[in-house]
Amino acid sequence: MFVSKFGSAPKFYVRAPGRVNLIGEHIDYCGYAVLPMAIEQDILIAVEPVKTQVVQLANTNSSYLDFSTSANNIEINKTKPLWHNYFLCGLKGIQEHFGLNNPTGMNCLLDGTIPPSSGLSSSSALVCCAGLVTVRANGKTLSKVELAEICSKSERYIGTEGGGMDQSISFLAEEGTAKLIEFSPLRATDVRLPSGAAFVIANSCVEMNKAATSHYNIRVMECRLATKLLSKSKGLDWKKMLKLQDVQVKLGVSLEEMLTIVEEVFHPEPYSTEEICKYLGISLEEFRTQILSQNTQDVSTFKLYQRAKHVYGEAARVLEFKKICDEAPANAIQLLGELMNQSHISCKEMYECSCPELDRLVDICLQFGAIGSRLTGAGWGGCTVSMVPTDKLNNFLKNVEKAYYQTNVQSSALENNSLFATKPGRGALVFVEA
Ligand code: GLA
């Protein structure tokens, strides 16, 4: 297809994987460690650098239209998260990092196997893949950690305030191991998953595009506001505090103690804009311009108690999950399953990032033998991840397929690639023909 499209052969190929997050949802942007693994499904781009400064993009899937732009005039349209805009995020991030004055043009053909808008990080895989394509095409090199950091920042050109988990695992993943990803400084530690259990991804078939809705950014904002109010209540310099983890670090207390502080400081009723302004001693104007992001300007109530409870509780569950994997007690699978179930309940009740279809799918997975099951990724649609004892796997897959996918037309149409067991896959790579 590349040859028929561009009239010449590609010089190299880059692939970047999607991911499934096993535990630690919506806490990366609060500074806390998460525990994902890369999946086998990826974005693959065939590339030929060219002498002109034109970047031409094509997709093997004809529903994604061709696009071309001059390499030194990148404009990213935040109002329409079309596929090529994710490529441009990676391209622009790398160009800016190196201050490239004469970036090379290139012909690129993209092929993807990650179901889009399903919480398996197809968009970040595309940003990462484009970033690595740009590094290679311009004859530069970067470490994986540098690539992950640049691509995490550059995805924000699309307007989402993501935390960096997806880009980090896409670059830092290694075959056969999940990773504990910690931030500031970014680092990844192996987490050996228990033998005797398989991790199964099931797509609720409800599509959720983070960039097209404001759900995600509202949560980021609520966490930021919770940070400010908690800081103020403890006499800290609240203007400098951005993440819920900053409060814990400054106070030098445990996550359990942070949960108690949340109980003391916040009321469960939603906070109004006026109440927050009064608490912080700022005007409505300052609130809108200095604190709220562009696409959260219309939000008028904020659930600070619930969001902070989720974040500190979930951060503790991630550390517990890692500890159980390291110590591998005889009942490891049971203990890990309980943590996954608690995580889902917290996502559903405290963070309100689930949806009826995800909840139904989790119930079905638990009913047919999963020890733990939860939504994975941003939520509000997308996939669940379930931990299933290996000896029950075949029956589990058969029964879940019958119970969830064969009962409604939309799901059964999407049944292929919607329910599969997965193993920790490898991170992003460049392939060059010999
Ligand atoms: C998306 C974001 C991540 C993370 C998850 C929720 O995938 O890109 O940074 O916040 O949602 O855990």
Image (cartoon, grey):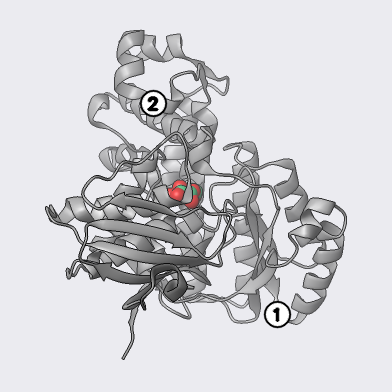
Does residue 111 appear anywhere in the picture? yes
Residue 222, image x and y in percent? Answer: 45, 29
Seen in the picture, residue 229 relative to 214 is either above or below; the reply is above
Picture disc at residue 294:
2
Q: Residue at x 45, y 33 (%)?
A: 79
- As drawn, is 263 to the left or to the right of 229? right
The residue closer to the viewer here, 128 or 346, is 128
Residue 274, image x and y in percent? Answer: 44, 9
Residue 329, image x and y in percent? Answer: 57, 76
Picture disc at residue 390:
1
Q: Total of numbered circles in the picture?
A: 2
Seen in the picture, residue 268 relative to 413 is either above or below; the reply is above
Give the quarter of the image for residue 168.
bottom left
Residue 160, image x and y in percent? Answer: 42, 40
Q: Residue at x 39, y 26 (%)?
A: 294
Q: Nearer the viewer, mark 1 or mark 2?
A: 2
Q: Amino acid at mark 1?
A: Thr
Does residue 185 appear anywhere in the picture? no
Q: Residue at x 36, y 58 (%)?
A: 56
Q: Is mark 2 within 8 Å of ligand 1?
A: no
Q: Quadrant of the C terminus?
A: bottom left
Seen in the picture, residue 79 relative to 322 is either above or below; the reply is above
The residue closer to the viewer here, 338 or 348, is 348
Seen in the picture, residue 8 relative to 30 is either above or below; the reply is below
Dot 1 alpha-carbon crowd within 10 angstroms: few under 14, some 14 to 19, many 20 or more: few
Q: CA distance from mark 1 to mark 2?
A: 47 Å
Q: Amino acid at mark 2?
A: Gln
Which element is circle 1 on?
Answer: helix
